[in-house]
Image (spheres, rainbow, N blue to C red):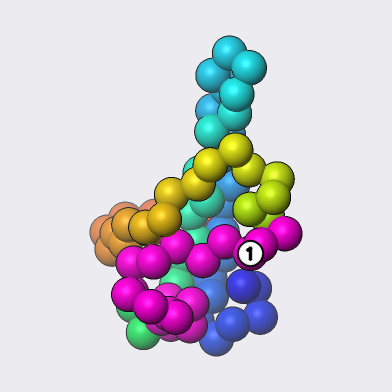
């Protein structure tokens, strides 16, 4: 992802839930067009590599897009 044009960075957050962990990936893009590099189906289809899928109990099939209004100390 880091090599794709328009990619500005990403974060991985974890939430511990007893014996499980919920992972949240947020990626930052210059614009919506740049985020479209992943588009293989619908624009909001999640792209999770098969090797990563094997490590996960479950994952969302859709992604959500948000437009950043204010950011501090995260993006260059």
In terms of secondary structure, what is the magenta stretch mainly? Answer: loop
Residue 75 position within the rendered picture, expressed as x and y whole percent measured from the top left? 50, 63
Q: Residue at x 50, y 46 (%)?
A: 59
- Does 72 sit above or below residue 8? above
Q: Residue at x 43, y 79 (%)?
A: 39
Please say whether residue 61 is visible from this viewpoint: yes
In the rendered structure, does residue 41 fall within the stretch colored magenta?
yes
* Nearer to the camera, 76 or 36: 36
* Mark 1 secondary-structure assignment: loop
Q: Which residue is mark 1?
A: 49
Quarter holding residue 32:
bottom left
Q: Is residue 66 left or right of residue 23?
A: left
**Magenta range:** 34-51
Quarter holding residue 41:
bottom left
Residue 7 position within the rendered picture, expressed as x and y whole percent measured from the top left? 53, 75
* Nearer to the camera, 17 or 10: 17
């Amino acid at each position: 992802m880091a090599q794709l044009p328009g990619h500005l960075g990403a974060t991985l957050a974890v939430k511990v839930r007893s014996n499980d962990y919920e992972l949240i990936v947020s990626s930052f893009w210059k614009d919506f067009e740049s985020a479209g590099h992943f588009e293989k189906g619908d624009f909001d289809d999640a792209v999770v590599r098969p090797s990563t899928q094997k490590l996960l109990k479950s994952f969302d099939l859709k992604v959500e897009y948000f437009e950043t209004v204010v950011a501090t100390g995260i993006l260059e």
